[in-house]
Image (spheres, grey):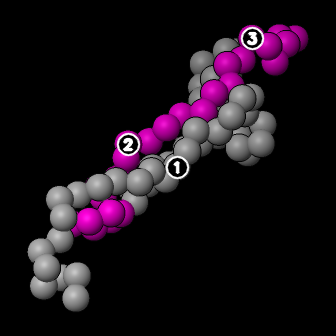
Amino acid sequence: MRSSDENMIVFINGNWSSCSVTCGEGVRTRSVTCKIFLEFSRTVAELPKKQCPGVRPPDTQRCVMPPCPDAMTR
């Protein structure tokens, strides 16, 4: 029987989305999943996030677009 140490468990980050706004300050998001590579079957499976070691990468991030025209801020 193989030990679980031979299986690689990591966070997998998706691509960042577009900014939530076209001007000013907004947010962009991505998926962050915990995956395990099962050596014995050479497959990948998703695990609950709490089973991944280390700090979970952020799934939201601030984004800043060009300033909004005055008409949009009033």
**Residue 25: mark:** none
Check disc 1: other Cα within 10 Å, few if <14, some if 14-19, many if 20+: some
- Residue at the spot 41% in from the left edge and 54% down from the top edge: 62
Q: Classify mark 1: helix, strand or loop.
A: loop
In terms of depth relative to the viewer, which is nearer, 69 or 46? Answer: 69
Point out residue 5 in the picture as x, y percentages from the top left corner: 79, 13
Separation of disc 2 and disc 1 at Cα? 10 Å
* N-terminal label among 2 and 1: 2
Whether the residues at callouts 2 and 3 have beta carbons within 8 Å, the answer is no
- Residue range highlighted in magenta: 1-26
Compared to 2, does 34 lie above or below? below
Instruction: For the C terminus, give its image quadrant.
Output: bottom left
Magenta region includes residue 41: no
Separation of disc 2 and disc 3 at Cα? 28 Å
Point out residue 23 in the picture as x, y percentages from the top left corner: 21, 66
Residue receiving disc 2 = 15
* N-terminal label among 3 and 1: 3
Magenta region includes residue 18: yes
Compared to 53, does 41 lie above or below? above
Q: Amino acid at mark 1?
A: Asp
Q: Amino acid at mark 3?
A: Glu
Residue receiving disc 1 = 59
In terms of depth relative to the viewer, which is nearer, 66 or 40? Answer: 66
Q: Amino acid at mark 2?
A: Asn
